[in-house]
Amino acid sequence: MTIKEQGSKERQKVDEAITGLVDLKIEQCRSARAIGREALYEKLNDDPPKEVVKARLQILDAFGVIDKSKYALGSYGERELSVESGHSELRKFDHDTADIVNALGQLKREFVLKVYSGDDEVSKLMSDLASRVDKILN
């Protein structure tokens, strides 16, 4: 049975299925990307980029020999170098996450419109949706 042949209740059920599936994928994506972002942040802090190390060393040089000695003695075992949240890799990661979430939202709108205007079979529509979601996420 095509979508046009279905009644409004059936269309609403397909609409809810599409919306639910895409919303679930958005939440799963956000959750996974948040974990990935934290891992990237930790990686960058564990092995700070050269520009961070260089900038920090320039600051230490500006403080002079006494301040360098205090830093070296006072921070033994502590990490004074850090990666700010504005680091280019983190900004790119955040931008990519926003792009993925936006693509999933656009996909949801597209498929909900198909529910109310298309002749596609419901099974084909859901299969196409799943394929497109996988393509966005992978």
Image: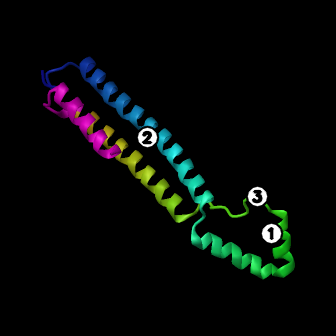
User: In the rendered image, is residue 32 in sight?
Assistant: yes
How crowded pointer 1 is (Cα within 10 Å; few <14, some 14-19, many 20+) is rated as few
| Distance Cα–Cα, label 2 vs label 1 | 42 Å
Residue 78: mark in rendering = 3
* Residue at left offset 35%, top offset 42%: 104
- Front in this rendered view, residue 8 or 114: 114
SS at badge 3: loop
- Front in this rendered view, residue 4 or 28: 28
Q: Is residue 124 magenta?
A: yes
Q: Is residue 130 magenta?
A: yes
The residue range painted magenta reads: 115-138
- Front in this rendered view, residue 87 or 77: 77
SS at badge 1: helix
Residue 4 at x, y percent in the picture: 15, 26
Residue 81 at x, y percent in the picture: 69, 64
> Could you tell me the amino acid type at mark 1?
Ala
**Dot 1 corresponds to which residue?**
72
**Dot 2 corresponds to which residue?**
29
| Distance Cα–Cα, label 2 vs label 3 | 34 Å
* Residue at left offset 32%, top offset 25%: 17
| Distance Cα–Cα, label 3 vs label 1 | 10 Å
> Could you tell me the amino acid type at mark 3?
Glu
